[in-house]
Image (cartoon, grey):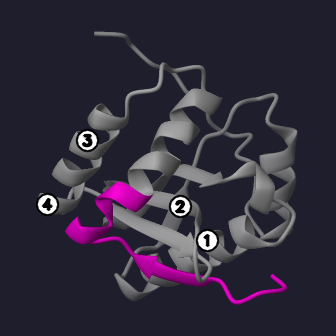
Amino acid sequence: MAEAVRISQAAAGDIDGVAGLFDLYRQFYRQQSDIAGARRFLAERIARAESFVFIAEDATTALGFAQLYPSFTSAGMARIFILNDLFVIPAARGRGIGSALLRHAAEFAKEAGAVRLMLSTAVDNRTAQAVYEREGWERDDAFLTYRLAL
């Protein structure tokens, strides 16, 4: 990262800044833009401590964010975190911001006593996969993921 980028944990006062990023992230995954819904969703998660949101900013612009959801591993009887969202605005990609957010999330999780981070990404999102692997994440070939729409 050539210029100074600061990563901090988002609080209630940061909702407007991160909501725009969250909305762009959702659009990347083919969802309709919904800034009001993004603000509401993030405000609820942060207020209830149901997720931890980290925002990367330079002096003037919100550049990216990561969102972690707390969970547990029953087999390991320990805390884990799910890195559910990671997004960097297109104009800021290639500057190491995604990697910095991943490292920040890992440090936060380690300090919180977690034994691992988990994430899922689209099969065709090769750019993100390359970043994850460069940062030491390992692809899980032992388990399949299933889901049930309700």
Whole-number angstrom distance, CA of label 1 to CA of label 4: 22 Å
Look at label 1 and name its amino acid.
Leu
Q: Residue at x 38, y 13 (%)?
A: 148
Q: Which residue is mark 3?
A: 41
Is the C-beta separation of discs 1 and 2 under 8 Å? yes
**Which of disc 4 and disc 1 is earlier in sequence?**
4
Whole-number angstrom distance, CA of label 3 to CA of label 2: 15 Å
**Which of disc 4 and disc 3 is earlier in sequence?**
3
Return the x and y of residue 78 as percentages of the image width and height: 33, 68
Q: Which residue is mark 1?
A: 101
Indicate which disc residue 65 carries: 2
Please indicate whether residue 124 sits to the left or right of residue 143 in the image.
right
Position of residue 34 relative to residue 10, above or below, is above
Whole-number angstrom distance, CA of label 3 to CA of label 1: 21 Å
Image quadrant where residue 40 sits = top left
Q: Residue at x 52, y 50 (%)?
A: 21
